[in-house]
Amino acid sequence: MTGLPHDLPVPIVIAQHMPPGFTASLAKRLDEMSALHVVEGQDGFELMPGVAAIAPGGKHMLVEKKDGRFICRLSDAPPLHSVKPAADLLFLSVADVAGAKAVGIILTGMGKDGTEGARAIRSKGGVVLAESPETCVVYGMPKSAVEAGAVNESLPLYRIPERVKLLVRVRKGE
């Protein structure tokens, strides 16, 4: 997050496997450290360029497109892969609303959450990046997505921000 500029031309949505009560403080801390404005997602919140929304612990977060705007939606659906929020549900919604302009990123973590959503993003022409083993604390989620063929590129964490900046500018036609 700290490697991304305040004028990033797209919004960012994040599913972090954390319980209720922890994501608000994570959003506050990242907001203080990052050039981006970082918030905890709220139902109906309009997702704007240069803003990152973190799914609240204990809620799934989805993205909906309404009147040309991207809107954050929260869901109380049951856990998926034993987690809530789930990256798969978030990625699936992003694939639906952003299609070929979507960029998905899977970072360190246990399990396979994110793999199916990454497949959906790729199948619609979007790009999926995964953190490579050299910088992962736990190479579970990225490994699952890589092995499933759902990832375009694996990169060490420190190289992901530069790649994202290039991808979003190219996908926005700049």
Image: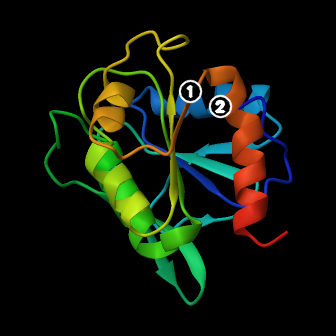
Which of the 4 image quarters holds residue 92? bottom left
Q: Position of residue 170 (x, y in %)?
A: 76, 63
Q: Position of residue 124 (x, y in %)?
A: 42, 70
Q: Quadrant of the N terminus?
A: top right
Q: Position of residue 116 (x, y in %)?
A: 26, 50
Label 2 belongs to which residue?
A: 28
Are there few (<14), some (14-19), or many (20+) residues within 10 Å of tag 1?
few
- The answer, for residue 59, to whether it is visible in the render is no
Q: Is residue 152 above or below residue 9?
A: above
Under mark 2, the amino acid is Lys
| Residue 25 circle label | 1
Are there few (<14), some (14-19), or many (20+) residues within 10 Å of tag 2?
some
Q: Position of residue 81 (x, y in %)?
A: 16, 37
Q: Nearer the viewer, residue 39 or 97?
A: 97
Q: How many marks?
A: 2
| Residue 72 circle label | none
**Residue under the point 36% across and 47% down:** 150
Which of the 4 image quarters holds residue 91? bottom left
Q: Nearer the viewer, residue 90 or 173?
A: 173
**Residue under the point 60% across and 79% down:** 69
Q: Is residue 28 above or below residue 140?
A: below
State the SS at label 2. helix
**Residue under the point 33% across and 54% down:** 119
Q: Is residue 51 above or below residue 147?
A: below
Under mark 1, the amino acid is Ser
Q: Nearer the viewer, residue 23 or 161?
A: 161
Q: Quadrant of the C terminus?
A: bottom right
Measured Cα–Cα span from mark 2 to mark 1 = 5 Å
